[in-house]
Amino acid sequence: MTEYEAADLQESKRAVLLQQLALMQSLGSHLQSLGQTARALLFGYVTLAYLIGAKLTGVQAVILSFFFVVWTSAIYSEGRMIVTGAIRMYESAVDSATDLNMDLGNQWDSFIKYAKPYHSIFTLVLSLAALYFMWSIRHP
């Protein structure tokens, strides 16, 4: 391999690494907007439970709770896929950066360390708390 080819390969790897980092930033933004959607859904459900929960029939409460659980599960699973994808990209980026003798810094370390387990626990606790709130409003 000539010196030019080696330099070109090095720059190509560098460009791929920068694209991976940009995609990770994009995934982070998408995860943030997904979190805003989840908070809006949770706020809407709790508000409905507080305002009209006691007036709902049993069937209406079950339907409302069913749709809440379905949408929460969809948001949770999409968030889970984003977090898993970001972790895989980070691991790939670290390998690429190591090959290129580049330092990525530690801006992603805390996200990678805490995102997976706490994302699941946080979503589950909030969803169960909202369902319990609906139950307590309907059965004082």
Image (cartoon, rainbow, N blue to C red):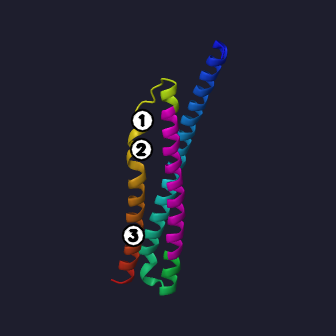
Q: Amino acid at mark 3?
A: Leu
The residue at the far front in this view is: 1
Q: Which is more toward the observer, 128 or 108?
A: 108
**How many neighbours does mark 2 have within 10 angstroms: few (below 14), some (14-19), or many (20 or more)?**
some
Q: Earlier in the sequence, mark 1 or mark 3?
A: 1
Q: Please report the residue visible at 46 percent of the width from the left and 30 percent of the height from the top.
A: 104
The residue tagged 3 is: 128
Predominant SS of the magenta segment: helix
On the image, the x and y values in percent for residue 24 come to 53, 40
Q: Amino acid at mark 2?
A: Phe
Q: Earlier in the sequence, mark 3 or mark 2?
A: 2
* Residue 28 makes an appearance in the image: no
Question: In this image, 119 relative to 37: left or right?
Answer: left
Question: In this image, 126 relative to 82: left or right?
Answer: left
| 74 is higher (above) or lower (below) than 27 | below
The residue at the far top in this view is: 3
**How many neighbours does mark 1 have within 10 angstroms: few (below 14), some (14-19), or many (20 or more)?**
few
- Helix, strand, or loop for circle 3? helix
The residue tagged 1 is: 107
Residue range (magenta): 66-95
Q: Please report the residue visible at 57 percent of the width from the left and 36 percent of the height from the top.
A: 20
**How many neighbours does mark 3 have within 10 angstroms: few (below 14), some (14-19), or many (20 or more)?**
few
The residue at the far left in this view is: 140
Q: Please report the residue visible at 51 percent of the width from the left and 44 percent of the height from the top.
A: 88
Quarter that holds the N terminus: top right
Q: Which is more toward the observer, 40 or 13?
A: 13
Q: Which is more toward the observer, 54 or 131?
A: 131
On the image, the x and y values in percent for residue 48 come to 46, 72
Question: In this image, 99 relative to 106: left or right?
Answer: right
How far apart are labels 1 and 3 at the CA level?
32 Å
Residue 120 location, quadrant: bottom left
The residue tagged 2 is: 111
